[in-house]
């Protein structure tokens, strides 16, 4: 008989860390609504009549025009005014997974991103547009998106200058989004899936990293450190789910996974999920297929997903993660919350699949971790974000009584166009960056980079490592909050 006791005690101990408020009852539904609202503040292009973030206005309407393509729309990734294709595509993938797995009501946010990716994938035959604006130029100014006059150069990957990483993630995003709209809008879903297949073929046929092809405008901002193998396998997994009549069927993408998985990282252990590295996310996703259907050849993904989970659970064999004294998973100092939200999502997705299959996480020997322990650990991370931490502070802007007031975000820090119609120039805007005044506009729902390894946080706009939000931090949190708010998949 396997023992579940000691890991449960260890997780409980993590949740009872001294000085942490653990008895709080959070309104997860309210936090979920706010987390989704944040994406409206990040919109680029012509805003729709139903836009709820009223301090934003139309911006970057002519993106792509210098290259004779329409690239208006999409999302600004974080606090600047650049549209980076790799993190944007990951955002759409994770938003879609949040809808599919946990029933999050985020269809408009998915569609806003998917519409842009569809344009980027189909505007020019044999190419994929992957970025708008040179970050080196953008970062020389502190401007509202509605005012920006820095160059809006568009960048693409081609057979001669490949980008299998960004193309693979774009294919994954389009395929995942096609599943979201399969029943709601079949025609749109079909367009997304058709584009996903073409982009994946492009990524697989013309292999190379976009960090090499576009190094001067990609690095060091969103360098693909993990390479492109992870995105190819990740995209194939999503295309299998989107293309096959049932997850257990042996279609072209399952054949691809079986034939190429070993070379693309199926048996590599990895302990981080991010916009850059999808290896462990792919293992959790394909473990779902294995657990539900016992598909031949996929047990390896369950084994390696188990190792990842064991690395997170205090007391488990294989545990190797770092937590702050207050109980927050800590990976690195710059925007640590992105790892927290993505990890919480995977814990919950895996717990759900294991629970449905009557399974557990095998951490070696006779010890196993029950799905309930994964849920408890994920809840601890989400609750920390919402205010159950040593500082008693919510790291989601606009949630709770105490939250960051000086976010590293251009639009939030400056007077809105509605309140200050006159243009605020490039250099003039820096007075708002360096000001200690609270944000002029509350960036409701944004999750900032978060505290350091000692649970310390400095609420300063200049402190971008801790104070900058991002779409790829919020996207997986949408799924986690939907889980705790009681949402159900395919509602």
Image (spheres, rainbow, N blue to C red):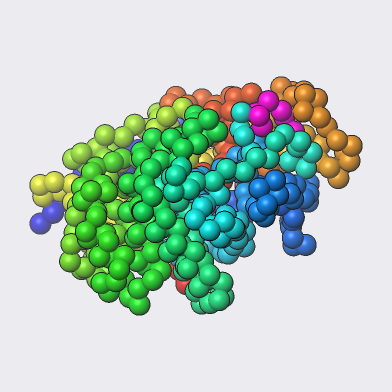
Q: Which residues are magenta?
A: 137-143
Expressed as whole percent of the image width and height from the top left, the position of residue 216 reads 53, 30
Q: Position of residue 58 (x, y in %)?
A: 77, 50
Viewer-side residue, 322 vs 335: 335
Residue found 57% across the figure and 43% down from its top: 155
In percent of width and height, residue 178 lies at: 49, 67
Drawn side of residue 428 relative to residue 133, left or right: right
Position of residue 59 in the picture relative to residue 225 (left or right): right
Left or right of 424 in this view: 22: left
In the displayed structure, 332 sits above or below 184; it is above
* 440 is within the stretch colored magenta: no
Q: Is residue 427 left or right of residue 235?
A: right
Residue in view at x 75 percent, y 37 percent? 148
Question: Residue at horizontal 37%, vertical 67%?
Answer: 241
Picture quadrant of residue 261: bottom left
Q: Quadrant of the N terminus?
A: bottom left
């Amino acid at each position: 008989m396997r023992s579940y006791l000691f890991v449960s005690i260890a997780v409980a101990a993590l949740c009872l860390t001294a000085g942490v408020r653990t008895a709080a009852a959070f309104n997860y539904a309210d936090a979920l609504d706010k987390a989704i609202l944040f994406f409206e503040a990040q919109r680029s292009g012509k805003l729709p009549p139903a836009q709820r973030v009223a301090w934003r206005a139309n911006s970057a309407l002519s993106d792509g025009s210098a290259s004779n393509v329409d690239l208006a729309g999409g999302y600004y990734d974080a606090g600047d005014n650049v549209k980076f294709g790799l993190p944007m595509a990951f955002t759409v993938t994770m938003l879609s997974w949040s809808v599919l797995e946990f029933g999050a009501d985020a269809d408009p946010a998915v569609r806003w991103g998917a519409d842009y990716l569809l344009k980027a994938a189909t505007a020019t035959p044999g190419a994929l547009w992957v970025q708008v604006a040179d970050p080196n130029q953008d970062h020389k100014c502190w401007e509202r998106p509605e005012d920006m006059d820095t160059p809006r150069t568009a960048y693409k990957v081609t057979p001669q200058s490949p980008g299998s990483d960004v193309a693979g993630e774009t294919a994954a995003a389009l395929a995942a989004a096609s599943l979201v709209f399969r029943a709601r809008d079949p025609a749109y879903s079909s367009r997304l899936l058709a584009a996903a297949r073409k982009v994946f073929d492009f990524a697989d046929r013309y292999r190379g990293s976009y960090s090499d092809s576009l190094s001067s405008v990609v690095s060091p901002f969103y360098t693909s450190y993990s390479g492109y193998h992870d995105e190819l396998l990740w995209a194939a997994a999503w295309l299998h789910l989107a293309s096959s009549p049932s997850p257990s069927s042996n279609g072209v993408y399952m054949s691809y996974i079986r034939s190429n998985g070993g070379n693309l990282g199926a048996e590599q252990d990895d302990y981080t999920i991010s916009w850059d590295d999808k290896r462990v996310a792919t293992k959790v996703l394909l473990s779902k297929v294995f657990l539900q259907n016992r598909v031949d050849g996929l047990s390896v993904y369950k084994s390696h997903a188990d190792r990842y989970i064991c690395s997170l659970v205090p007391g488990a064999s294989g545990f190797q993660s770092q937590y702050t004294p207050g109980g927050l998973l800590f990976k690195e100092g710059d925007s640590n919350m992105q790892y927290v939200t993505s990890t919480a999502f995977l814990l919950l997705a895996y717990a759900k699949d294991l629970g449905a299959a009557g399974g557990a996480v095998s951490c070696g020997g006779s010890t196993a971790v029950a799905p309930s322990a994964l849920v408890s650990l994920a809840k601890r991370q989400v609750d920390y974000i919402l205010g159950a931490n040593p500082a008693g502070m919510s790291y989601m802007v606009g949630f709770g009584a105490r939250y960051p007031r000086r976010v590293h975000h251009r639009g939030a820090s400056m007077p809105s166009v509605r309140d200050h119609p006159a243009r605020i120039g490039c250099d003039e805007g820096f007075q708002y960056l360096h000001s200690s005044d609270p944000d002029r506009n509350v960036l409701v729902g944004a999750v900032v980079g978060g505290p350091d390894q000692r649970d310390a946080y400095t609420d300063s706009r200049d402190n971008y490592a801790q104070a900058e939000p991002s779409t790829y931090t919020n996207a997986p949190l949408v799924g986690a909050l939907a889980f705790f708010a009681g949402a159900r998949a395919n509602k």
